[in-house]
Image (cartoon, rainbow, N blue to C red):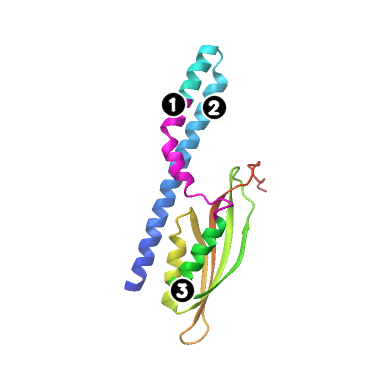
């Protein structure tokens, strides 16, 4: 049980950070929506000028929050370093890892898309579990979607991980339609 305490603690910290991140994004998005609605209802030039000043003030006040949140989103340029980071984590855990696939999946997000990374690893059970913790602790907004481990012999284990990372779209586009 003691071996799993770091994993449980990492899961709790990850869940808390994702909840905080989502809450901040939701609050900012709600404020932008309210500002847009107020702008649409502003009928006079004076009201529009006041609205523009308020929006500029809001954007100025939230600039540091927005810029710090943008650091958690992967870009086209940072995908290679993210893959290298995953590879280095596998080496630190003394695992033989293979990056099976890397690709984006359809989403309803307008400016971001999920980047799916499938990783396989072979090594001891404790190294396999520690690597799962490493994947959950990536600095980007990510989540370990699946983790499957099976014993190949008495000492060796084989695991498959699927990680989703929030990635900025190359060009913003309308969200994918949900069925």
User: In the image, what residue occupies the spot 54% across and 22% down?
Assistant: 39
Query: Is 170 within the magenta?
Result: no
Q: Secondary structure at mark 3?
A: helix
Residue 15, compared with residue 133, is above or below; it is above
Q: Is residue 67 left or right of residue 42?
A: left
Q: Are marks 3 and 2 in contact (CB under 8 Å)?
A: no
Query: Which of the labelled discs sits on residue 49, or is there none?
Result: none
Span shown in magenta: 56-78
Q: Quadrant of residue 6?
A: bottom left
For the residues labelled 3 and 1, the Cα–Cα distance comes to 49 Å
Q: Position of residue 81 (x, y in %)?
A: 52, 59
- Dominant SS in magenta: helix
Q: Position of residue 15 (x, y in %)?
A: 42, 55
Q: Secondary structure at mark 2?
A: helix
User: In the image, what residue occupies the spot 52% across and 64% down?
Assistant: 84
User: Which residue is the site of mark 1?
Assistant: 57
**For mark 3, does the 10 Å Cα neighbourhood hold few (<14), some (14 to 19), or many (20 or more) residues?**
many
User: In the image, what residue occupies the spot 46% across and 39% down?
Assistant: 66
For the residues labelled 1 and 2, the Cα–Cα distance comes to 14 Å
**For mark 1, does the 10 Å Cα neighbourhood hold few (<14), some (14 to 19), or many (20 or more) residues?**
few
- The nearer-to-camera label among 1 and 2 is 1
User: Which residue is the site of mark 2?
Assistant: 36
Residue 2, compared with residue 80, is above or below; it is below
User: Which residue is the site of mark 3?
Assistant: 128
Name the N-terminal-most of marks 3 and 2: 2
């Amino acid at each position: 049980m003691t071996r799993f305490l770091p994993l449980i603690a990492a899961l709790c910290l990850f869940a808390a950070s994702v909840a905080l991140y989502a809450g901040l994004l939701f609050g900012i998005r709600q404020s932008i929506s309210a500002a847009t609605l107020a702008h649409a209802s502003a009928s006079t030039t004076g009201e529009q000028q006041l609205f523009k000043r308020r929006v500029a003030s809001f954007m100025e006040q939230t600039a540091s929050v927005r810029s710090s949140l943008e650091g958690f989103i992967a870009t086209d340029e940072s995908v290679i370093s993210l893959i290298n980071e995953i590879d280095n984590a596998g080496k630190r855990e003394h695992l033989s890892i293979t990056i099976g696939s890397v690709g984006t999946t359809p989403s309803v997000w307008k400016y971001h898309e999920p980047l799916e990374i499938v990783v396989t690893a072979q090594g001891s059970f404790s190294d396999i579990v520690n690597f799962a913790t490493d994947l959950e602790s990536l600095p980007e907004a990510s989540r370990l979607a699946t983790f499957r481990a099976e014993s190949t012999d008495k000492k060796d284990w084989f695991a498959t991980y699927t990680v989703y990372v929030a990635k900025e779209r190359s060009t913003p586009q309308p969200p994918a339609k949900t069925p």
